[in-house]
Image (cartoon, helix red, strand yellow):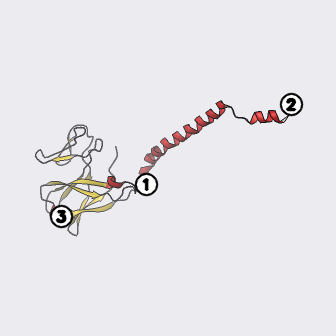
Amino acid sequence: MSDPAVPQMAERVVSRRRLLTWLNLAFGALAAAVVSVPIVAYLLSPLLEMRQTWVRLGPVNQFRIGATQEVAYDDPSPLPWAGQTARTAVWVRRISETEFTVFAVNCTHLGCPVNWLPEADLFMCPCHGGVYYADGTVAGGPPPRPLFRYATRIQDGNLEILSRPLPIG
């Protein structure tokens, strides 16, 4: 005589194949979630309002008329864990007593930092050979558009820029 509890016990045992199938599905779903979160965040990020703030670059008299110089500042809108990457820079050119042009330090090709070559009166991207004229327009290489310009103002004798996220693409 067979015990009636034995067949019921056998039905509850999960086969190795079924266990591995469930584990495979679970890890696949986890991997899909990990990959999809940044993609969804990227697609939804334009819908989030980005804060624009005026950032002080320094006293107006520290900039010489006709000269272009690099000025470093702390980006007011980075992520809390950005650390040293929140420190960024711009290229400031003083045109006249009250007129300034401020360019982003990033190449419009892939975002590499551009260098100012005063002897040649050009901005140069050392990574991929992008070249920009002194007014920020593309002189050669792969950059698809001119250097990004910041809005400027003079407030209490100091030069300020309107800091905002750089355009993507």
Instruction: List the single residue furthest toward the bottom.
Output: 156
Depth check, front residue: 76 or 132 = 76
* Picture coordinates of residue 162, whole percent (x, y): 29, 59
Q: Secondary structure at mark 3?
A: helix
* Picture coordinates of residue 64, whole percent (x, y): 12, 59
Query: Does 24 sit above or below residue 106?
Result: above
- Residue 144, label in figure: none
Identify the residue at image location x=37%, y=59%.
51
- Residue 60, label in figure: 3
* Picture coordinates of residue 98, whole percent (x, y): 17, 63
Depth check, front residue: 41 or 115 = 115
Instruction: List the single residue furthest toward the left.
Output: 119
Depth check, front residue: 40 or 25 = 25
* Picture coordinates of residue 123, whole percent (x, y): 18, 45
Depth check, front residue: 57 or 52 = 57
Q: Secondary structure at mark 2?
A: loop
What residue is shown with label 2? Answer: 2
Whole-angstrom CA distance, mark 2 to mark 1, is 68 Å
